[in-house]
């Protein structure tokens, strides 16, 4: 019986991988406009069959923008789904992108801010989130001559995980996995390298503090604050958003963040984490249709506080 279920799990893993591989490879051979259009339509179609995602997005938008009408929220969600589809198409085309043609897809904006952080010589922590084309941002930056290490969250399906990371690394980026994170991050910083960290997702309480995010406490990683305070690395916000007027993505870098140092270690971690989170919130407010509203950002609650997401009713 154990052998039977083991075979079933292995087959499921292989079939999931095969489906992802086929979709990515197919998108990769289509003309770019066709691939982006198809991927956006596919994303919107899949969303219809994911009531939990729908409910989560509705709750998140009601928290972040309580004054908005239903029409405004629906418009933002349409933009989000289009953005996700477009990014999937870009991800599929990574093997086709090079330093010679990347400028036709994405342009640098405020790059002097990144270079300023780099010139400090203590390494750069690339503060970002699931905003715009986050997969494309670090990939393109490497093609422009600035590869980085990125903190990799493992995908449960090992075959898909390996496939995704191999695509991510085509431009010279390298992953940092959880089991090697402490040793490797310090080594990269010592060599004045760059580490990209997505800092806008719900985090386990053991690795987080609660800070304000859109007016509600959110469990947020302390990793960036701890590493920046320990190494004095420059924290540079960066994100790639679609510029409708330009017809390209814009990879925007903000000035390096000045760290708060009070002499109280725990307070410094809390206050800097809050500062980084506020920066990300301001970016999301500026481009609300380019953030991932389907993520349970407020899932972890302070002790004694009721859950934000209640799926016990409504069939989600």
Image: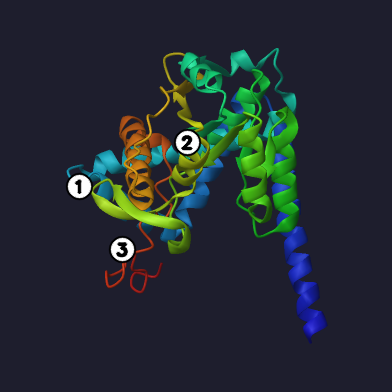
Residue, x 38% and y 49% (percent of image)? 265
Of 285 and 220, the residue lying toward us: 220
Q: As drawn, which residue projects farthest toward the front? A: 263
Residue pointed to by mark 3:
308
Left or right? Give the position of 171 relative to 274.
Answer: right
Of 43 and 144, the residue lying toward us: 144
Residue pointed to by mark 1:
66
User: Is residue 149 shown above or below 14?
Assistant: above
Residue pointed to by mark 2:
128
Kindly report which numbered mark, 2 or 3, lies closer to the viewer in this rendering.
2
Left or right? Give the position of 234 relative to 156.
Answer: left
Query: Residue 214, image x and y in percent?
Result: 27, 45
User: Is residue 45 shown above or below 169?
Assistant: below
Residue, x 46% and y 18% (percent of image)? 113
Which is nearer the N-term, disc 3 or disc 1?
1
Kindly report which numbered mark, 2 or 1, lies closer to the viewer in this rendering.
2
Left or right? Give the position of 276 relative to 65.
Answer: right
**Regarding mark 2 in the picture, which secondary structure is present there?**
strand
- Mark 2, Cα crowd under 10 Å, few <14 / some 14-19 / many 20+, is many
**Regarding mark 1 in the picture, which secondary structure is present there?**
loop
């Amino acid at each position: 019986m154990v052998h039977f279920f083991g075979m079933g799990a292995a087959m499921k893993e292989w079939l999931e991988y095969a489906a992802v591989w086929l979709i990515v490879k197919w998108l990769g051979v289509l003309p770019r406009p066709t691939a982006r259009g198809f991927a956006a339509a596919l994303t919107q179609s899949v969303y219809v069959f994911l009531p939990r995602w729908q409910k989560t997005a509705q709750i998140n938008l009601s928290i972040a923008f309580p004054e908005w009408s239903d029409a405004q929220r629906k418009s933002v969600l349409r933009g989000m789904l289009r953005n996700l589809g477009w990014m999937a198409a870009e991800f599929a085309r990574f093997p086709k992108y090079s330093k010679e043609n990347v400028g036709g897809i994405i342009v640098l904006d405020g790059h002097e801010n990144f270079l300023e952080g780099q010139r400090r010589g203590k390494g750069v922590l690339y503060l970002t989130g699931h905003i715009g084309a986050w997969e494309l941002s670090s990939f393109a930056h490497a093609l422009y001559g600035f590869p980085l290490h990125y903190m990799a969250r493992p995908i449960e399906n090992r075959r898909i995980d390996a496939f995704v990371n191999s695509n991510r690394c085509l431009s010279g980026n390298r992953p940092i996995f959880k089991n090697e994170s402490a040793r490797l991050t310090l080594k990269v910083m010592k060599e004045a390298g760059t580490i990209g960290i997505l800092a806008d997702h719900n985090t386990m309480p053991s690795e987080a503090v609660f800070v304000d995010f859109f007016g509600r406490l959110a469990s947020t990683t302390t990793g960036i604050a701890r590493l920046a305070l320990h190494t004095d690395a420059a924290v540079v916000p960066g994100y790639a958003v679609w510029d409708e007027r330009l017809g390209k993505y814009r990879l925007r870098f903000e000035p390096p963040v000045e760290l708060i140092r009070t002499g109280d270690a725990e307070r410094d971690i809390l206050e800097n984490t809050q500062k980084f989170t506020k920066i990300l919130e301001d970016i999301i407010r500026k481009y609300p249709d380019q953030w991932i509203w389907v993520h349970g950002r407020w899932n972890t609650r302070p002790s004694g506080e009721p859950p934000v997401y209640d799926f016990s009713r409504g069939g989600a």
